[in-house]
Protein backbone atom coordinates (compact mmCIF):
# COMPACT_ATOMS: atom_id res chain seq x y z
CA UNK A 1 0.00 0.00 0.00
CA UNK A 2 1.12 3.51 -0.68
CA UNK A 3 -0.40 5.08 2.44
CA UNK A 4 2.96 5.93 3.93
CA UNK A 5 4.15 7.63 0.75
CA UNK A 6 0.95 9.69 0.56
CA UNK A 7 1.23 10.65 4.23
CA UNK A 8 4.87 11.66 3.89
CA UNK A 9 4.23 13.66 0.72
CA UNK A 10 1.27 15.44 2.34
CA UNK A 11 3.40 16.22 5.38
CA UNK A 12 6.15 17.57 3.14
CA UNK A 13 3.70 19.77 1.22
CA UNK A 14 2.09 21.07 4.43
CA UNK A 15 5.53 22.23 5.53
CA UNK A 16 5.94 24.19 2.28
CA UNK A 17 2.54 25.92 2.40
CA UNK A 18 2.53 29.36 3.94
CA UNK A 19 0.35 29.44 7.09
CA UNK A 20 -1.06 32.71 5.73
CA UNK A 21 -2.67 30.77 2.89
CA UNK A 22 -4.48 28.46 5.33
CA UNK A 23 -4.90 25.78 2.65
CA UNK A 24 -6.26 22.40 3.71
CA UNK A 25 -5.07 19.33 1.84
CA UNK A 26 -8.54 17.94 1.27
CA UNK A 27 -7.94 16.09 -1.99
CA UNK A 28 -9.72 12.71 -2.18
CA UNK A 29 -7.18 9.93 -1.69
CA UNK A 30 -8.43 8.29 -4.90
CA UNK A 31 -7.06 11.28 -6.81
CA UNK A 32 -3.58 10.76 -5.40
CA UNK A 33 -3.32 6.97 -5.42
CA UNK A 34 -2.64 6.31 -9.11
CA UNK A 35 0.46 8.51 -9.12
CA UNK A 36 1.55 7.30 -5.68
CA UNK A 37 1.39 3.72 -6.99
CA UNK A 38 3.46 4.65 -10.02
CA UNK A 39 6.09 6.31 -7.88
CA UNK A 40 6.19 3.42 -5.45
CA UNK A 41 7.03 1.05 -8.29
CA UNK A 42 9.78 3.36 -9.52
CA UNK A 43 13.51 3.13 -8.85
CA UNK A 44 13.65 6.62 -7.34
CA UNK A 45 14.91 7.23 -3.82
CA UNK A 46 12.23 7.66 -1.14
CA UNK A 47 12.69 11.42 -0.69
CA UNK A 48 12.40 12.10 -4.41
CA UNK A 49 9.18 10.07 -4.58
CA UNK A 50 7.76 12.17 -1.76
CA UNK A 51 8.77 15.38 -3.48
CA UNK A 52 7.28 14.38 -6.82
CA UNK A 53 4.06 13.30 -5.16
CA UNK A 54 3.76 16.56 -3.21
CA UNK A 55 4.24 18.54 -6.45
CA UNK A 56 1.47 16.43 -8.01
CA UNK A 57 -0.83 17.04 -5.03
CA UNK A 58 -0.22 20.81 -5.28
CA UNK A 59 -1.20 20.81 -8.98
CA UNK A 60 -4.24 18.56 -8.44
CA UNK A 61 -5.39 20.83 -5.61
CA UNK A 62 -4.93 23.92 -7.81
CA UNK A 63 -7.05 22.29 -10.53
CA UNK A 64 -9.65 21.31 -7.94
CA UNK A 65 -9.88 24.76 -6.33
CA UNK A 66 -10.26 26.61 -9.64
CA UNK A 67 -12.62 23.91 -10.91
CA UNK A 68 -14.96 24.62 -7.99
CA UNK A 69 -15.11 28.39 -8.51
CA UNK A 70 -18.05 28.47 -10.93
CA UNK A 71 -20.38 26.78 -8.43
CA UNK A 72 -19.37 29.07 -5.60
CA UNK A 73 -21.91 31.79 -4.98
CA UNK A 74 -19.28 34.54 -4.83
CA UNK A 75 -18.02 36.48 -1.85
CA UNK A 76 -15.19 35.28 0.33
CA UNK A 77 -15.65 31.59 -0.58
CA UNK A 78 -14.98 32.41 -4.25
CA UNK A 79 -12.07 34.70 -3.42
CA UNK A 80 -10.42 31.98 -1.31
CA UNK A 81 -10.79 29.38 -4.07
CA UNK A 82 -9.33 31.71 -6.71
CA UNK A 83 -6.44 32.64 -4.43
CA UNK A 84 -5.78 29.05 -3.34
CA UNK A 85 -5.59 27.92 -6.96
CA UNK A 86 -3.29 30.81 -7.91
CA UNK A 87 -1.06 30.21 -4.92
CA UNK A 88 -0.81 26.45 -5.53
CA UNK A 89 0.01 26.94 -9.23
CA UNK A 90 2.87 29.25 -8.29
CA UNK A 91 3.94 26.99 -5.42
CA UNK A 92 4.40 23.98 -7.69
CA UNK A 93 6.79 26.05 -9.81
CA UNK A 94 8.70 27.14 -6.71
CA UNK A 95 8.90 23.54 -5.46
CA UNK A 96 10.22 22.25 -8.80
CA UNK A 97 12.90 24.97 -8.70
CA UNK A 98 13.73 24.41 -5.03
CA UNK A 99 14.14 20.65 -5.49
CA UNK A 100 15.97 21.01 -8.83
CA UNK A 101 13.21 19.24 -10.75
CA UNK A 102 13.77 21.49 -13.75
CA UNK A 103 13.16 18.81 -16.39
CA UNK A 104 9.89 17.96 -14.68
CA UNK A 105 8.88 21.63 -14.72
CA UNK A 106 9.68 21.92 -18.43
CA UNK A 107 7.60 18.76 -19.04
CA UNK A 108 4.67 19.91 -16.91
CA UNK A 109 4.32 23.51 -18.14
CA UNK A 110 2.92 22.66 -21.61
CA UNK A 111 0.67 19.97 -20.12
CA UNK A 112 -0.83 22.36 -17.57
CA UNK A 113 -1.20 24.93 -20.32
CA UNK A 114 -3.03 22.41 -22.54
CA UNK A 115 -5.32 21.47 -19.66
CA UNK A 116 -6.30 25.16 -19.34
CA UNK A 117 -6.98 25.37 -23.10
CA UNK A 118 -9.15 22.23 -22.95
CA UNK A 119 -11.00 23.44 -19.87
CA UNK A 120 -11.66 26.78 -21.59
CA UNK A 121 -13.28 24.84 -24.42
CA UNK A 122 -15.44 22.93 -21.97
CA UNK A 123 -13.43 19.72 -22.13
CA UNK A 124 -11.81 18.55 -18.93
CA UNK A 125 -8.78 16.50 -19.94
CA UNK A 126 -7.04 16.56 -16.60
CA UNK A 127 -5.88 12.94 -17.13
CA UNK A 128 -3.14 14.37 -19.34
CA UNK A 129 -1.34 15.29 -16.16
CA UNK A 130 -1.09 11.72 -14.92
CA UNK A 131 -0.18 10.42 -18.39
CA UNK A 132 2.69 12.87 -18.77
CA UNK A 133 3.94 12.16 -15.25
CA UNK A 134 3.81 8.45 -16.00
CA UNK A 135 6.05 9.03 -19.02
CA UNK A 136 8.37 11.15 -16.91
CA UNK A 137 8.72 8.47 -14.22
CA UNK A 138 9.43 5.81 -16.90
CA UNK A 139 12.14 8.01 -18.39
CA UNK A 140 13.67 8.62 -15.00
CA UNK A 141 13.64 4.88 -14.26
CA UNK A 142 15.44 4.33 -17.52
CA UNK A 143 18.11 6.90 -16.57
CA UNK A 144 18.53 5.39 -13.10
CA UNK A 145 18.90 1.83 -14.47
CA UNK A 146 21.44 2.96 -17.07
CA UNK A 147 23.45 4.72 -14.39
CA UNK A 148 23.68 1.58 -12.23
CA UNK B 1 3.78 74.32 -26.15
CA UNK B 2 5.79 71.10 -26.40
CA UNK B 3 3.54 68.07 -26.01
CA UNK B 4 4.40 65.87 -23.03
CA UNK B 5 6.09 62.62 -24.00
CA UNK B 6 4.49 59.35 -22.98
CA UNK B 7 6.60 56.97 -20.87
CA UNK B 8 7.51 54.74 -23.83
CA UNK B 9 8.46 57.75 -25.95
CA UNK B 10 10.58 59.20 -23.15
CA UNK B 11 12.38 55.86 -22.83
CA UNK B 12 12.69 55.54 -26.62
CA UNK B 13 11.02 52.13 -26.70
CA UNK B 14 8.47 51.27 -29.36
CA UNK B 15 5.26 50.36 -27.58
CA UNK B 16 3.99 48.83 -30.81
CA UNK B 17 6.94 46.40 -30.83
CA UNK B 18 6.33 45.55 -27.17
CA UNK B 19 2.67 44.84 -27.93
CA UNK B 20 3.63 42.71 -30.94
CA UNK B 21 5.97 40.65 -28.77
CA UNK B 22 3.20 40.13 -26.22
CA UNK B 23 0.68 39.11 -28.90
CA UNK B 24 3.21 36.72 -30.42
CA UNK B 25 3.21 34.72 -27.20
CA UNK B 26 -0.32 33.63 -28.11
CA UNK B 27 -0.15 33.79 -31.89
CA UNK B 28 2.79 31.39 -32.12
CA UNK B 29 1.35 28.90 -29.66
CA UNK B 30 0.66 25.81 -31.78
CA UNK B 31 -1.66 24.43 -29.09
CA UNK B 32 -4.15 27.27 -29.51
CA UNK B 33 -6.78 26.47 -32.16
CA UNK B 34 -7.35 29.28 -34.69
CA UNK B 35 -10.94 29.80 -33.61
CA UNK B 36 -10.13 29.63 -29.90
CA UNK B 37 -12.08 32.05 -27.71
CA UNK B 38 -9.19 31.94 -25.28
CA UNK B 39 -6.69 33.14 -27.89
CA UNK B 40 -9.02 35.86 -29.14
CA UNK B 41 -9.69 37.07 -25.59
CA UNK B 42 -5.99 37.47 -24.88
CA UNK B 43 -5.33 39.36 -28.12
CA UNK B 44 -8.31 41.63 -27.34
CA UNK B 45 -6.95 42.22 -23.86
CA UNK B 46 -3.52 43.16 -25.24
CA UNK B 47 -5.11 45.48 -27.79
CA UNK B 48 -7.26 47.19 -25.15
CA UNK B 49 -4.15 49.12 -24.18
CA UNK B 50 -2.07 49.59 -21.09
CA UNK B 51 1.11 51.50 -20.35
CA UNK B 52 3.29 48.35 -20.33
CA UNK B 53 5.25 49.68 -17.37
CA UNK B 54 6.67 46.27 -16.48
CA UNK B 55 8.00 45.35 -19.95
CA UNK B 56 9.48 48.85 -20.23
CA UNK B 57 11.25 48.27 -16.91
CA UNK B 58 12.73 44.97 -18.16
CA UNK B 59 14.09 46.76 -21.24
CA UNK B 60 15.45 49.66 -19.17
CA UNK B 61 17.15 47.12 -16.85
CA UNK B 62 18.85 45.52 -19.87
CA UNK B 63 20.51 48.86 -20.68
CA UNK B 64 22.70 48.40 -17.59
CA UNK B 65 24.40 45.29 -18.94
CA UNK B 66 27.23 45.00 -21.47
CA UNK B 67 25.58 42.49 -23.78
CA UNK B 68 21.83 42.81 -24.17
CA UNK B 69 20.44 39.96 -26.31
CA UNK B 70 17.46 41.72 -27.86
CA UNK B 71 15.45 38.55 -28.42
CA UNK B 72 15.84 37.33 -24.86
CA UNK B 73 15.23 40.74 -23.32
CA UNK B 74 12.05 41.33 -25.28
CA UNK B 75 10.77 37.85 -24.55
CA UNK B 76 11.31 38.47 -20.84
CA UNK B 77 9.59 41.83 -21.20
CA UNK B 78 6.55 40.19 -22.79
CA UNK B 79 6.60 37.48 -20.11
CA UNK B 80 6.50 40.12 -17.36
CA UNK B 81 3.42 41.71 -18.95
CA UNK B 82 1.77 38.29 -19.36
CA UNK B 83 2.27 37.57 -15.65
CA UNK B 84 0.92 41.00 -14.74
CA UNK B 85 -2.09 40.71 -17.08
CA UNK B 86 -2.91 37.22 -15.75
CA UNK B 87 -2.89 38.58 -12.21
CA UNK B 88 -5.19 41.45 -13.23
CA UNK B 89 -7.71 39.01 -14.73
CA UNK B 90 -7.84 37.07 -11.44
CA UNK B 91 -7.78 40.32 -9.39
CA UNK B 92 -10.93 41.49 -11.16
CA UNK B 93 -12.69 38.29 -10.06
CA UNK B 94 -11.39 38.73 -6.50
CA UNK B 95 -12.39 42.41 -6.35
CA UNK B 96 -15.65 41.80 -8.22
CA UNK B 97 -14.67 44.56 -10.69
CA UNK B 98 -16.80 44.51 -13.84
CA UNK B 99 -14.61 46.82 -15.96
CA UNK B 100 -10.98 46.73 -17.08
CA UNK B 101 -9.48 49.42 -19.33
CA UNK B 102 -12.94 50.68 -20.21
CA UNK B 103 -14.16 47.27 -21.37
CA UNK B 104 -16.01 44.46 -19.62
CA UNK B 105 -13.59 42.50 -17.44
CA UNK B 106 -12.63 39.01 -18.61
CA UNK B 107 -14.93 37.24 -16.11
CA UNK B 108 -17.85 39.33 -17.33
CA UNK B 109 -17.11 38.26 -20.93
CA UNK B 110 -16.21 34.60 -20.33
CA UNK B 111 -17.60 33.78 -16.89
CA UNK B 112 -15.48 33.11 -13.81
CA UNK B 113 -14.17 29.73 -14.98
CA UNK B 114 -13.35 31.02 -18.45
CA UNK B 115 -11.42 33.96 -17.01
CA UNK B 116 -9.53 31.70 -14.61
CA UNK B 117 -8.47 29.43 -17.49
CA UNK B 118 -7.24 32.45 -19.49
CA UNK B 119 -5.12 33.69 -16.56
CA UNK B 120 -3.77 30.20 -15.85
CA UNK B 121 -3.00 29.67 -19.52
CA UNK B 122 -0.97 32.91 -19.59
CA UNK B 123 1.07 31.91 -16.55
CA UNK B 124 1.74 28.41 -17.89
CA UNK B 125 2.71 29.81 -21.30
CA UNK B 126 5.37 31.97 -19.64
CA UNK B 127 6.94 28.92 -17.97
CA UNK B 128 6.81 27.02 -21.25
CA UNK B 129 8.47 29.83 -23.21
CA UNK B 130 11.16 30.51 -20.66
CA UNK B 131 12.10 26.83 -20.75
CA UNK B 132 13.65 27.61 -24.13
CA UNK B 133 16.49 28.81 -21.92
CA UNK B 134 16.97 25.28 -20.66
CA UNK B 135 20.50 25.29 -22.08
CA UNK B 136 21.22 28.07 -19.59
CA UNK B 137 19.74 26.35 -16.61
CA UNK B 138 20.75 28.86 -13.96
CA UNK B 139 19.27 31.73 -15.93
CA UNK B 140 16.00 29.84 -16.45
CA UNK B 141 15.71 28.97 -12.76
CA UNK B 142 16.39 32.51 -11.72
CA UNK B 143 13.96 34.14 -14.16
CA UNK B 144 11.17 31.71 -13.33
CA UNK B 145 11.72 31.99 -9.64
CA UNK B 146 11.61 35.78 -9.89
CA UNK B 147 8.45 35.82 -11.96
CA UNK B 148 6.61 33.28 -9.79
CA UNK B 149 3.63 34.94 -8.18
CA UNK B 150 3.73 33.25 -4.78
CA UNK B 151 4.51 36.56 -3.04
CA UNK B 152 1.77 38.32 -4.94
CA UNK B 153 -0.74 35.70 -3.75
CA UNK B 154 0.50 36.06 -0.17
CA UNK B 155 -0.11 39.82 -0.45
CA UNK B 156 -3.69 39.04 -1.50
CA UNK B 157 -4.15 36.60 1.42
CA UNK B 158 -2.80 39.26 3.80
CA UNK B 159 -5.25 41.79 2.41
CA UNK B 160 -8.15 39.35 2.69
CA UNK B 161 -7.42 38.36 6.27
CA UNK B 162 -7.17 42.02 7.34
CA UNK B 163 -10.45 43.33 5.92
CA UNK B 164 -11.87 45.93 8.35
CA UNK B 165 -8.91 45.15 10.64
CA UNK B 166 -7.95 48.48 12.18
CA UNK B 167 -5.17 46.95 14.27
CA UNK B 168 -3.00 46.23 11.25
CA UNK B 169 0.37 47.97 11.65
CA UNK B 170 2.06 50.23 9.11
CA UNK B 171 4.82 47.64 8.78
CA UNK B 172 2.23 44.98 7.88
CA UNK B 173 0.67 47.34 5.34
CA UNK B 174 4.10 48.00 3.79
CA UNK B 175 4.85 44.27 3.67
CA UNK B 176 1.57 43.61 1.86
CA UNK B 177 2.31 46.43 -0.63
CA UNK B 178 5.79 45.03 -1.20
CA UNK B 179 4.32 41.60 -1.97
CA UNK B 180 1.40 42.83 -4.08
CA UNK B 181 3.02 45.58 -6.13
CA UNK B 182 6.67 46.42 -5.57
CA UNK B 183 8.25 42.98 -5.90
CA UNK B 184 7.26 42.42 -9.55
CA UNK B 185 8.39 45.92 -10.57
CA UNK B 186 11.73 45.44 -8.84
CA UNK B 187 12.12 42.02 -10.46
CA UNK B 188 11.51 43.45 -13.94
CA UNK B 189 14.47 45.83 -13.69
CA UNK B 190 16.69 43.17 -12.16
CA UNK B 191 16.01 40.34 -14.62
CA UNK B 192 16.40 42.80 -17.50
CA UNK B 193 19.83 43.77 -16.18
CA UNK B 194 20.87 40.18 -15.55
CA UNK B 195 19.77 39.04 -18.99
CA UNK B 196 22.18 41.61 -20.42
CA UNK B 197 25.06 40.39 -18.26
CA UNK B 198 25.05 43.26 -15.73
CA UNK B 199 27.14 42.86 -12.62
CA UNK B 200 25.29 41.48 -9.62
CA UNK B 201 25.68 44.63 -7.48
CA UNK B 202 24.20 46.72 -10.30
CA UNK B 203 21.27 44.31 -10.68
CA UNK B 204 20.69 44.52 -6.91
CA UNK B 205 20.72 48.33 -6.99
CA UNK B 206 18.15 48.24 -9.78
CA UNK B 207 16.02 45.83 -7.74
CA UNK B 208 16.15 48.20 -4.80
CA UNK B 209 15.29 51.17 -7.04
CA UNK B 210 12.30 49.27 -8.50
CA UNK B 211 11.08 48.24 -5.05
CA UNK B 212 11.08 51.83 -3.79
CA UNK B 213 9.35 53.00 -6.93
CA UNK B 214 6.73 50.27 -6.50
CA UNK B 215 6.09 51.25 -2.89
CA UNK B 216 5.68 54.91 -3.88
CA UNK B 217 3.35 53.81 -6.70
CA UNK B 218 1.14 51.81 -4.30
CA UNK B 219 1.00 54.69 -1.80
CA UNK B 220 0.03 57.11 -4.57
CA UNK B 221 -2.67 54.66 -5.70
CA UNK B 222 -4.03 54.50 -2.14
CA UNK B 223 -3.97 58.31 -1.91
CA UNK B 224 -5.79 58.77 -5.23
CA UNK B 225 -8.68 56.78 -3.77
CA UNK B 226 -9.17 59.69 -1.34
CA UNK B 227 -8.10 62.66 -3.44
CA UNK B 228 -9.73 62.07 -6.80
CA UNK B 229 -13.37 62.70 -7.56
CA UNK B 230 -15.81 59.88 -8.19
CA UNK B 231 -15.84 60.88 -11.89
CA UNK B 232 -12.06 60.61 -12.16
CA UNK B 233 -11.97 57.30 -10.30
CA UNK B 234 -15.00 55.77 -12.00
CA UNK B 235 -16.13 54.65 -8.51
CA UNK B 236 -16.98 56.48 -5.27
CA UNK B 237 -14.04 58.06 -3.42
CA UNK B 238 -12.87 55.98 -0.47
CA UNK B 239 -13.85 52.72 -2.21
CA UNK B 240 -10.96 50.84 -0.60
CA UNK B 241 -12.27 51.55 2.90
CA UNK B 242 -15.83 50.72 1.88
CA UNK B 243 -14.55 47.28 0.82
CA UNK B 244 -12.67 46.91 4.12
CA UNK B 245 -9.18 47.64 2.81
CA UNK B 246 -7.31 49.56 5.48
CA UNK B 247 -4.79 51.55 3.44
CA UNK B 248 -2.03 53.92 4.52
CA UNK B 249 -4.15 57.12 4.78
CA UNK B 250 -6.57 55.24 7.08
CA UNK B 251 -3.72 53.94 9.23
CA UNK B 252 -2.37 57.46 9.68
CA UNK B 253 -5.88 58.80 10.40
CA UNK B 254 -6.28 56.13 13.10
CA UNK B 255 -3.51 57.89 15.03
CA UNK B 256 -5.91 60.81 15.55
CA UNK B 257 -7.64 59.89 18.80
CA UNK B 258 -10.77 61.91 17.97
CA UNK B 259 -11.15 60.32 14.54
CA UNK B 260 -10.15 56.73 15.39
CA UNK B 261 -13.46 55.61 17.04
CA UNK B 262 -15.49 56.66 13.98
CA UNK B 263 -13.11 54.80 11.65
CA UNK B 264 -13.09 51.70 13.82
CA UNK B 265 -16.89 51.65 13.76
CA UNK B 266 -16.93 51.10 9.98
CA UNK B 267 -17.74 47.53 9.04
CA UNK B 268 -19.25 45.66 6.10
CA UNK B 269 -22.81 46.69 7.05
CA UNK B 270 -22.18 50.37 7.80
CA UNK B 271 -24.64 52.63 5.88
CA UNK B 272 -22.99 54.50 2.99
CA UNK B 273 -23.77 57.95 4.40
CA UNK B 274 -21.93 57.12 7.67
CA UNK B 275 -18.89 55.90 5.74
CA UNK B 276 -19.06 59.01 3.50
CA UNK B 277 -18.85 61.26 6.57
CA UNK B 278 -15.81 59.40 7.94
CA UNK B 279 -14.10 59.49 4.54
CA UNK B 280 -14.68 63.26 4.47
CA UNK B 281 -13.00 63.58 7.87
CA UNK B 282 -10.03 61.46 6.74
CA UNK B 283 -9.69 63.71 3.67
CA UNK B 284 -9.54 66.79 5.93
CA UNK B 285 -7.15 65.25 8.45
CA UNK B 286 -3.38 65.33 8.12
CA UNK B 287 -3.37 61.64 7.13
CA UNK B 288 -3.13 62.36 3.41
CA UNK B 289 -0.11 64.64 3.91
CA UNK B 290 1.59 62.03 6.07
CA UNK B 291 1.00 59.36 3.42
CA UNK B 292 2.32 61.73 0.77
CA UNK B 293 5.44 62.31 2.86
CA UNK B 294 6.12 58.58 3.19
CA UNK B 295 5.63 58.15 -0.57
CA UNK B 296 8.06 61.01 -1.15
CA UNK B 297 10.60 59.39 1.17
CA UNK B 298 10.56 56.26 -1.02
CA UNK B 299 11.08 58.44 -4.09
CA UNK B 300 13.99 60.26 -2.39
CA UNK B 301 15.60 56.91 -1.64
CA UNK B 302 15.06 55.83 -5.25
CA UNK B 303 16.68 59.07 -6.41
CA UNK B 304 19.74 58.43 -4.27
CA UNK B 305 20.14 55.06 -6.01
CA UNK B 306 20.12 56.83 -9.39
CA UNK B 307 23.01 58.94 -8.16
CA UNK B 308 24.98 55.75 -7.54
CA UNK B 309 24.35 54.63 -11.12
CA UNK B 310 25.35 57.88 -12.80
CA UNK B 311 28.22 56.30 -14.74
CA UNK B 312 25.63 54.45 -16.85
CA UNK B 313 23.98 56.52 -19.59
CA UNK B 314 20.77 54.58 -18.82
CA UNK B 315 20.55 56.31 -15.42
CA UNK B 316 18.54 58.92 -17.32
CA UNK B 317 15.91 56.25 -17.97
CA UNK B 318 15.63 55.71 -14.23
CA UNK B 319 15.05 59.45 -13.84
CA UNK B 320 12.31 59.17 -16.44
CA UNK B 321 10.71 56.33 -14.44
CA UNK B 322 11.05 58.36 -11.23
CA UNK B 323 9.43 61.33 -12.92
CA UNK B 324 6.62 59.13 -14.21
CA UNK B 325 5.91 57.46 -10.87
CA UNK B 326 6.38 60.47 -8.68
CA UNK B 327 5.57 63.39 -10.93
CA UNK B 328 9.11 64.67 -10.40
CA UNK B 329 11.22 66.72 -12.73
CA UNK B 330 14.42 64.95 -13.73
Image: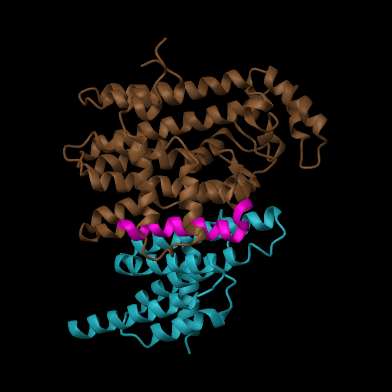
The chain in brown: B
Q: What is chain A's hue in the picture?
A: cyan
- Residue A129 location, x and y as percent? 44, 75
Horizontal arrangement in the rendering, residue A6 relative to residue B267 (left or right): left
- Residue B26 location, x and y as percent? 40, 55
What residue is rendered at 70% in x and 53% in y?
A: A75
Q: Residue most toward the top? A: B1
| Image quarter of the N terminus of chain B | top left
Q: Nearer the viewer, residue B165 or B44?
A: B44
- Residue B180 location, x and y as percent? 50, 42
Q: Please, is residue B106 above or below residue A12 in the view?
A: above
What residue is rendered at 25% in x and 27% in y?
A: B314
Q: Nearer the viewer, residue B254 or A100?
A: A100
Q: Please, is residue A114 above or below residue B330 in the view?
A: below
Residue interval drawn in magenta: B108-130
Q: Quadrant of residue B255?
A: top right
Q: Please say which color scheme the image uses.
A: by chain
| Image quarter of the C terminus of chain B | top left
What residue is rendered at 80% in x and 33% in y?
A: B272
Horizontal arrangement in the rendering, residue B115 relative to residue A145 (left or right): right
Q: Is residue B118 magenta?
A: yes
Q: Is residue B255 magenta?
A: no
Q: Residue most toward the left? A: B66
- Residue A12 location, x and y as percent? 45, 69
Q: Quadrant of residue B312?
A: top left
Amino acid sequence: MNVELIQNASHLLRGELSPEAGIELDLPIADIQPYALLLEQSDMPALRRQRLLSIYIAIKLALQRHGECEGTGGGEALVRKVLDGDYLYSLYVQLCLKWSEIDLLAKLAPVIKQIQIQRAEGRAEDDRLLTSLEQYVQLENHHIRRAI
Amino acid sequence: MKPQLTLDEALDISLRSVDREIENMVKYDKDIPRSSALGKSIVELVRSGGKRVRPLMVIVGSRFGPSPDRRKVWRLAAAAEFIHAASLIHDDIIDDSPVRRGQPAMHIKLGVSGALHVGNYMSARVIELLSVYSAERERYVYDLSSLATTQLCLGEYQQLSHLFDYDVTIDEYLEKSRNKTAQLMATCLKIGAQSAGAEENIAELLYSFGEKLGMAFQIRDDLLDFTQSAEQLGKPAGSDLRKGQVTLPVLFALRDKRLAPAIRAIGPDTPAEVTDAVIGKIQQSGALDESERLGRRYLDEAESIINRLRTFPAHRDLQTLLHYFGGRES
